[in-house]
Image: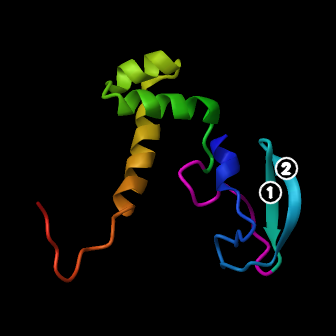
């Protein structure tokens, strides 16, 4: 599953970036951690577009239908979620796509 790929052994606290953490309970089938420096709790999805997201199992199907150039309403109907939910998911991920820019080219660039 997508969530398993996000897990990282070097996960740091999203607030203070401290790598010192210990396991602290479970919530929504995810391991939570507590930062030893600031005391904040977090999980592997904190700071990602999947944080605090419900219906995670339907999300990948919805994104696939949007990538097929379907409208938000048609995508929502195919995945069986409300159109507002599908729009919020799309809006959340488009914000993250804007941040994922390739580094600018420098030097001599040739193209055919």
In this picture, which residue range is highlighted in magenta? Answer: 37-50
Number of numbered discs on residues? 2
* Residue 6 higher or lower than 10, as above or below: above
The answer to whether 82 appears left or right of 98 in the picture is right
Quadrant containing the N terminus in the rendered view: top right
Where residue 72 is drawn, which disc sits there? none
Q: Position of residue 68 (x, y in %)?
A: 35, 28
Q: Position of residue 5 (x, y in %)?
A: 66, 51
Q: Is residue 81 magenta?
A: no
Which is nearer the eye, 96 or 41? 96
The reply to whether discs 2 and 1 touch (Cβ–Cβ < 8 Å) is yes
- Which residue: 70% across, 72% down? 13
Residue beneath the point at 38% across and 62% down = 99
Q: CA distance from mark 2 to mark 1?
A: 5 Å
The answer to whether residue 20 is above or below residue 111 is: below
Q: How is the image coloured?
A: rainbow
> Which residue is at 51% across, 21% downward?
79
- Circle 1 sits on which residue? 32
The picture places residue 80, in percent across and down from the top left corner, at 53, 18
Indicate left or right for 80 with 94 as reference: right
Residue 46 sits inside the magenta stretch: yes
**Residue nearest the observer in this picture, 82 or 48:** 48
- Write down the residue under mark 2: 26
Is tag 2's residue or tag 1's residue first in the polypeptide sequence?
2
Find numbered disc 2 in the image and state the secondary structure of the residue it sits on: strand
> Considering the image in quadrants, where does the C terminus appear?
bottom left
Quick one: SS at disc 1? strand
């Amino acid at each position: 599953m997508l969530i398993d790929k996000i897990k990282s052994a070097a996960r740091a606290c999203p607030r203070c970036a401290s790598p010192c953490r210990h396991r602290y309970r479970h919530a929504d089938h995810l391991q939570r951690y507590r930062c030893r420096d600031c005391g904040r709790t977090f999980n592997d999805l904190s700071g990602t577009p999947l944080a605090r997201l419900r219906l995670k199992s339907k999300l990948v199907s919805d994104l696939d239908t949007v990538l097929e150039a379907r409208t938000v309403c048609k995508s929502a109907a195919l995945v069986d979620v409300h159109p507002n939910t599908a729009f919020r998911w799309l809006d959340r991920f488009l914000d993250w796509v804007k941040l994922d820019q390739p580094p600018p080219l420098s030097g001599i660039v040739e193209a055919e």
